[in-house]
């Protein structure tokens, strides 16, 4: 149909290019897929409560309600001083917005059961887009209050952009008026803080007096009595004693100051300053919407900053941009696109080598057309252009031309029979269309189960199989329609056999083709824009292959090529010897099981995701409960001094009291800090980021008073610490004993570092024990006493004062220096109902205790975890195996159970899913082949290619020093669909020859000879498309080398072992049919069954 209507085909090509380009430019660009985490967070603040109180009064009650929800995967909680954080993980595919609404309804049902002085639970869902896409660090010769106001103005301007969800500030302070009261003077003048509060509130009003008509004129009456400055505040009369006024300034000090800092932020950049010192800044962390384009928003924010200098903010204020994911997205996508172009060039080189220049152009046209269709399907499916989707397209590059190669090669073969190009295009396409369709379908169904993987990692990785499915499906349509049509129009009408022409012009053309291939190879394998040894080696190999083709094999048909003749002779020998056939199959089976044994024998290590050489590190600092913000800052300064000694460090941003990229624990906390470190590019330093992290961990071990964790900054799903041991039970004391024992044991295992437990050092508590009977007799109650103690410690907001057109809070606090020791509590006085001042010691006493830092729950049970990072080169599964061996004789107390999280849990879940996907893929492939071949035995013959590919895949991982991880497993599953393609074409053509009268052995040998070069061509093009990615990108080396080595070994063994197995199975079928009549097809007698047919 298409061959006769070639003009329509031209229009279709133009339409695909236009629609594809439009879709490409409309796709949202981001570094990694935006994964909606099916998780809800419930945060409840209960100021002043100990972890045990938070657990019993808040967490237990909320968890009890949350467990009533459906589709819940797990419930995890942390009850710490004054705060409960509960994480509800839902099953993948759950509508998180609906679940957040259900949680809100459940919280409404339980609100009355929570303590009155606790805040209402805050409920929110989590998305990976909640991570900051950019940070603005604002500095200048201004006080912090002014810088904060400048930062607020910048923040408001940015939030007006479409696509921005939130802007968080770190390090900012607000202006505040503090009234520092002296407890002794309060007692002397018999005045309470409530009296001061009332006096200020009553004096600071601006009330309307109403409307009135006077002298025929309408007036609006207003009583402006609000404060003008702090001097008016100082001179407010609190009370009269013997007719003498007692002013605020008599009993308190009024200070125009700022709010207490809850976080600090500092920056250092070696490119801007040579001084080894960080600069205080106000940091704005900018979050985008889930559908926001990071690169586009990054440009818009920079425009605001450029245009706003001198208007939005002063000229002498500096705004330093860090963590710009817009730039990172562009760099990452440029790298991946570069690898895609390299892969495309390699595919073209291979096609040119195998089928000629004109033919290679026709076949290669399938690649951009398939990609354009894929871009449209991605836009239609609301997918983004990210690293994962681009990697999927790169992995598919070589496979996109497989169908076109088979069709082109068959057209070429039919033309050699004397048919004109139009007739040959029709006949050849019809001959191989069923095999091409089924081979494409088997590839698609192999990737289909991976697109439905469960869990966060499955959600994160599914972009790879989806884009592969899109592109391969598109390539099938293009190959069956566009390729034969273009062949009928642009190839010569009749096939002309090339002769060994010795003319100078022909020689020059051949030399030029060799040089052309060499230049293309140099460009295809460039690294970081430079021609290196890899480029030269590949250039020599590919140009050498072209030289062989042009000067040695020119003019030869398939049967005349020496290695095909050798193949024919070898197959003749094997097919004539039953013993050799059986031996060949047994050797293959032994190699397959032997390759699988490399994992339990430890020759091939298991991991979840490969570690890469990152240019960004994150250092998390945790200080003990009870540390002040300034104490945490002192620890951070020690960390910074260590960083200054590392020549690989370019810059860092320190956030004290806040972690901008912690999606669960949002908000300020004096016991946390985070330092984001930028390193020089990996090709400009001698040590890898993993080695640098190990060195930093060793240096940080000397810093006492904090838990310091070093990790790579990544957008991949966070699986927590690589080693995570969970102890579950009710008795916290016993859990703590076992946890500490396990921590000590784990430290003895080689390869562990940063070993710790979730039971941090508890906060020192001052418990106020109230004599309730005495208090009641004196006109006091526990609530009133607790409130006045809280007001004395934390202060209380009473009113506002307008300064510079902005409202400034007025807060009453105990004077600085008046509450510095435990004995100072004796200076506090409480006001009874009769107005009498009651000393603290008359109604209360203090008891000093040591509390615990936090109580964790998992699925409503108490849990204590022991976790550890691992050193460079160490393997988490091997470490866990050694730890389990060491605790075999440990007596676990009754009531405590052990489970393992971290990499072990993630590996178990992900590998189980992947194994299930592989089984489903094999079953689907078998069904498709059974339908196509109308046989149950021939699909088994074809599927024998899968274990052959596994042999090569595992050998490839060992040779290239890669571990077996999730990416490698993805490659194995992919081989289920890819490896069988050559076998399908081989078996299909053998069946075709037998139906046309060839005897079985002749058909097998002829099919092998005819399909020898197409089998190699399709495998080499697939390998060529992946090769640049595998060699250049460490992150994707596993899946790249699994496919490369798997296809390489499979292609070679398929040409030998599949024909052998085919002959053996067909022979068995003949003998079975002779002996068991029910297997003889109707219309065929037992005597007609022949092994030769």
Image: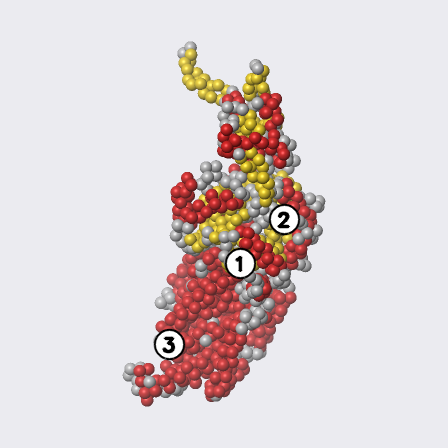
CA gap, disc 3 and disc 1: 56 Å
Residue at disc 1, secondary structure: loop
Q: Mark 3: give few (<14), some (14-19) or many (20+) Cα within 10 Å.
A: few
Q: Earlier in the sequence, mark 3 or mark 1?
A: 1
Which quadrant is home to the C terminus? bottom left
Within 10 Å of the Cα at label 2, are there few (<14), some (14-19), or many (20+) other Cα atoms? many
Question: For this view, does 515 lie left or right of residue 198?
Answer: right
Of the two numbered discs 3 and 2 in the rendering, the one whose residue sits closer to the viewer: 2
Residue 55 in the image, given as x and y percentages of width and height: 49, 46
Q: Nearer the viewer, residue 236 or 712?
A: 236
- In this figure, which residue is indicated by the disc labeled 3? 936
Farthest residue toward the left? 1083
- Label 3 to label 2, Cα distance in Å? 65 Å
The residue identified by callout 1 is 893
- Splitting the image into 4 quarters, where does residue 403 fall? bottom left
The residue where tag 2 is placed is: 706
Q: In what quadrant of the picture does the N terminus appear?
A: bottom left
Q: How is the image coloured?
A: secondary structure
Above or below 847: residue 866: below
Identify the residue at image location x=67%, y=47%. Answer: 638
Q: Position of residue 886 (x, y in %)?
A: 59, 64
């Amino acid at each position: 149909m298409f061959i006769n209507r070639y003009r329509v085909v031209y229009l279709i090509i133009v339409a695909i290019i236009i629609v594809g380009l439009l879709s490409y430019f409309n796709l949202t660009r981001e570094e990694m897929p935006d994964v909606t985490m099916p998780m809800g967070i419930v945060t409840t603040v209960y100021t002043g409560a100990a972890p045990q109180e938070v657990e019993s009064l808040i967490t237990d009650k909320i968890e009890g309600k949350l467990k009533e929800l459906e589709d819940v995967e797990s419930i995890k909680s942390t009850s710490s001083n004054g705060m409960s954080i509960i994480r509800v993980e839902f099953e993948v595919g759950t509508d998180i917005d609906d679940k957040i609404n259900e949680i809100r309804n459940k919280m409404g049902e339980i609100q009355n059961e929570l303590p009155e002085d606790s805040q209402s639970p805050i409920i929110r869902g989590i998305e990976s887009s909640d991570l900051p896409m950019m940070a603005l660090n604002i500095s200048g010769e201004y006080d912090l209050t002014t810088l904060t106001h400048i930062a607020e103005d910048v923040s408001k301007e940015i939030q007006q952009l479409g696509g921005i969800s939130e802007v968080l500030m770190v390090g900012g302070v607000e202006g505040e008026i503090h009234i520092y009261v002296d407890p002794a003077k309060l007692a002397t003048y018999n005045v309470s803080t409530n009296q001061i509060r009332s006096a200020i509130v009553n004096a600071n009003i601006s009330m309307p007096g109403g409307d009135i008509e006077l002298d025929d004129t309408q007036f609006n009456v207003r009583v402006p009595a609000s404060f003008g400055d702090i001097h008016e505040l100082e001179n407010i009369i609190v009370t009269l004693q013997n007719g003498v006024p007692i002013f605020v300034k008599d009993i308190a000090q009024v200070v125009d100051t700022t709010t207490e800092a809850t976080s600090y932020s500092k920056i250092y950049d070696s490119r801007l300053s040579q001084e080894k010192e960080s600069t205080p800044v106000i940091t704005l962390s900018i979050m985008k919407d889930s559908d926001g384009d990071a690169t586009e928003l990054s440009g818009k924010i920079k425009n605001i900053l450029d245009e706003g200098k001198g208007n939005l903010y002063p000229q002498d204020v500096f705004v330093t941009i860090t963590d710009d994911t817009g730039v990172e997205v562009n760099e990452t996508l440029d790298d991946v696109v570069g690898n895609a172009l390299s892969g495309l060039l390699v595919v073209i080189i291979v096609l040119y080598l195998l089928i000629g220049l004109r033919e290679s152009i026709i076949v290669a046209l399938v690649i951009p057309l398939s990609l354009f269709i894929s871009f449209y399907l991605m836009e239609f499916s609301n997918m983004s252009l990210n690293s994962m989707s681009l990697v999927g397209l790169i992995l598919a590059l070589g496979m996109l031309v497989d169908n076109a190669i088979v069709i082109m090669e068959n057209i070429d073969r039919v033309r050699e029979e004397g048919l004109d190009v139009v007739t040959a295009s029709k006949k050849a396409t019809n001959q191989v269309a069923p095999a091409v369709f089924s081979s494409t379908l088997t590839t698609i169904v192999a990737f289909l189960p991976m697109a439905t993987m469960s869990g966060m990692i499955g959600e994160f990785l599914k972009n790879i199989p989806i884009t592969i499915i899109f592109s391969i499906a598109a390539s099938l349509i293009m190959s069956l329609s566009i390729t034969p049509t273009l062949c009928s129009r642009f190839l010569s009408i009749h096939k002309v056999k090339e002769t060994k022409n010795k003319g100078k012009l022909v020689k020059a053309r051949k030399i030029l083709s060799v040089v052309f291939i060499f230049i293309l190879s140099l460009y295809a394998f460039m690294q970081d824009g430079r021609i290196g040894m890899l480029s030269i080696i590949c250039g020599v190999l590919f140009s050498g292959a072209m030289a062989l083709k042009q000067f040695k094999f020119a003019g030869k048909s398939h049967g005349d090529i020496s290695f095909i003749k050798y193949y024919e002779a070898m197959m003749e020998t094997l097919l004539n010897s039953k013993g050799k056939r059986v031996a060949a199959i047994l050797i293959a089976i032994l190699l397959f099981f032997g390759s699988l044994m490399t994992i339990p024998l430890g020759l091939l290590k298991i991991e979840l995701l490969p570690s890469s050489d990152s240019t960004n590190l994150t250092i998390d600092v945790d200080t003990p409960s009870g540390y002040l913000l300034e104490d945490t800052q002192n620890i951070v300064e020690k960390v910074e001094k260590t960083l200054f000694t590392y020549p690989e460090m370019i810059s860092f941003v320190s956030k004290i009291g806040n972690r901008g990229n912690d999606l669960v624990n949002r908000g300020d906390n004096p016991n946390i800090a985070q330092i984001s470190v930028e390193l020089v590019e990996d090709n400009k330093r001698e040590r890898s980021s993993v080695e640098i992290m190990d060195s930093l961990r060793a240096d940080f071990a000397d810093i006492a008073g904090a838990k310091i964790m070093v990790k790579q900054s990544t957008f991949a799903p966070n699986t927590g610490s690589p080693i995570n041991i969970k102890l579950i039970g009710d008795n916290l004391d016993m859990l703590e004993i076992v946890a500490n024992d396990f921590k000590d044991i784990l430290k003895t295992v080689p390869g562990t570092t940063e070993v710790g437990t979730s039971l941090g050092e508890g906060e020192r508590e001052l418990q106020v024990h109230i004599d309730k009977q005495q208090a009641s007799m004196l006109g006091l109650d526990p609530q009133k006493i607790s409130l006045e103690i809280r007001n004395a410690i934390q202060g209380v907001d009473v009113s506002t004062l307008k300064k510079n057109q902005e409202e400034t809070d007025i807060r009453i606090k105990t004077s600085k220096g008046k509450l510095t020791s435990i004995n100072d509590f004796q200076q506090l006085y409480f006001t009874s109902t009769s107005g009498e001042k009651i000393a603290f010691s008359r109604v209360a006493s203090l008891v000093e205790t040591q509390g615990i830092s936090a109580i964790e729950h998992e699925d409503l049970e108490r849990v204590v975890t022991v976790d550890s990072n691992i050193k460079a080169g160490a393997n988490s599964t091997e470490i866990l195996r050694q730890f389990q061996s060491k605790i075999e004789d440990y007596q676990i107390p009754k009531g405590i159970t052990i489970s393992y999280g971290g990499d072990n849990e993630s590996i178990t879940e992900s590998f189980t899913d992947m194994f299930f996907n592989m089984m489903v893929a094999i079953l689907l492939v078998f069904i498709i082949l059974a339908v196509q071949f109308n046989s149950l035995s021939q699909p088994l013959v074809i599927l024998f290619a899968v274990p052959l590919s596994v042999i090569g895949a595992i050998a490839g991982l060992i040779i290239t020093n890669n571990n077996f991880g999730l990416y490698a497993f993805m490659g194995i599953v992919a081989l289920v669909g890819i490896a069988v393609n050559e076998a399908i074409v081989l078996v299909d053509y053998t069946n075709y020859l037998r139906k046309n009268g060839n005897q079985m052995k002749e058909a097998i040998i002829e099919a092998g000879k005819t399909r020898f070069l197409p089998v190699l061509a399709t495998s080499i093009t697939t390998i060529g498309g992946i090769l640049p990615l595998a060699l250049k990108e460490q992150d994707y080396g596993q899946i790249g080398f699994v496919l490369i080595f798997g296809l390489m070994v499979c292609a070679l063994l398929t040409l030998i072992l599949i024909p052998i197995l085919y002959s053996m199975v067909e022979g068995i079928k003949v003998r079975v049919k002779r002996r068991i009549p029910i297997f003889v097809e109707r219309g065929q007698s037992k005597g007609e069954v022949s092994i030769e047919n």
